[in-house]
Structures are given as structure tokens and as C-alpha cells.
Image (cartoon, rainbow, N blue to C red):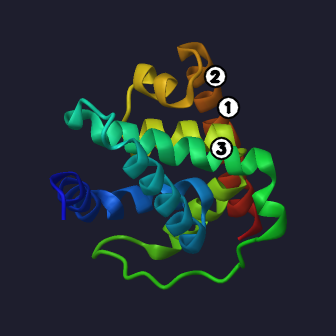
Amino acid sequence: MSDRDAAFQEYFAARSDAMRGTAYLLCGDWHRAEDLVQTAFTKLYLAWRRVERHEALDAYTRQIVVRTFLSERRRGWFRFESATDDAVDVAAPPGVYPEERMVLLEALAKVPPKQRACLVLRYWEDMSVEQTAVVLKCSEGTVKSQAARGLQTLRGLLSEQERVR
């Protein structure tokens, strides 16, 4: 095995789970999240020799995941394969109410893709406005407006679900 392959394999083992979590928040389906991560790491492997700043790999890989997600949404991949409403069983940490998480994830899945990407990057990945703008290839103003609209949409969806209960 070459040094290149060993370095890539080490990075994949260390970071694939974190990227899968981000992908899940973007698409709302664990199987599709796995596909997004596989596609992203394939693209990363193909560019591995050209990646000069290995300290910025997480940001670069996250950018690939987000762009792949947005690209698939534009191409209409979701029209041919769709997620089911079946919830995936995941053990909740102590002190966390799984019902609230399920409600939040369900509402997040209904937020438009660009707004959802902004919310995930800004509030889940804790990226700055500037970093999010770089990942999404848009202006900082667009990030601010998409995040604000996304939060407004999310709040509306969550309050709707509260009224139903």
C-alpha cells in the first residue's frame, strides 16, 4: 500500500462517521447519507494528490458532501429514490428526549435544501458565515438570508407540529 493510500485510509477511518452525521442532517435518510459520504470520499480520493493543506481536509470534505447533496437535489435524484417514513432506531444519550429529536429532524427535512445546508453548516458544524459562504459558493449576505429564512421555516414547522399535538 502506498503512503498516499495509507494516509487516505487513516483519514477516512477517522472522519467518515462525522461526515455521515452531517450528510444525514442534510438529507434526512441514513442510507442516502451513506451514499453521499461514499461519493464525497471517492471525489476526495481522486483529488488526494492535489490536496496541499491537509489541515483543511475536514472543511474540504464537508464542502464536497454539501455540494454533492445540492447537486443531487438539482438533478432530481430524489424523484427516483425516496426515503421511507420509517424511523431508524438510534439509542439516545441520557438526558436527551428522542421524541424532540425526531420532531426536529422531521421538520428539518422539510426545509428547502439550500436553507437546510445553511442551517446544518452554521449551527451543526458551527461554521462562521464566511466559511459557510465558501462551502456553498455564495456571498455572505446569501448565507445570512438563507439561514434566517431557514430558521423562520423551521420555527414555523415546529410550531405547526406543536399545534397538532
Looking at numbered disc 3 in the image, what kind of residue is underneath it? Answer: Leu
Q: Residue furthest front?
A: 2
Q: Which residue is mark 2?
A: 145
Q: Is residue 2 visible?
A: yes
Q: Which residue is mark 1?
A: 149
Q: Is residue 155 visible?
A: no
User: Is residue 82 toward the left or the right of residue 107 in the image?
Assistant: right
Look at the picture and state if 129 lies above or below 82: above
| Distance in Å between CA atoms under marks 1 and 3 | 17 Å
**In the rendering, which numbered label is found on residue 35?**
none
Looking at numbered disc 1 in the image, what kind of residue is underneath it? Answer: Arg
Q: Which residue is mark 3?
A: 70
Q: How many marks?
A: 3
Q: Residues within 10 Å of mark 2 (few under 14, many from 20)?
A: few
User: Is residue 59 toward the left or the right of residue 67 in the image?
Assistant: left
Q: Are marks 1 and 3 in contact (CB under 8 Å)?
A: no
Residue 141's quadrant in the figure?
top right
Measuring from the top left, give residue 28's x and y in whole percent.
60, 63
- Front position in the image: 98 or 41: 41
Q: Tag 3's secondary structure?
A: helix
Residue 161's quadrant in the figure?
bottom right
| Distance in Å between CA atoms under marks 2 and 3 | 18 Å
N-terminal label among 2 and 3: 3
- Front position in the image: 4 or 84: 4
Q: Residue furthest right?
A: 79
Measuring from the top left, give residue 124's x and y in whole percent.
41, 46
Looking at numbered disc 2 in the image, what kind of residue is underneath it? Answer: Ser
Q: Are marks 2 and 1 in contact (CB under 8 Å)?
A: yes
N-terminal label among 1 and 3: 3
Q: Quadrant of the N terminus?
A: bottom left
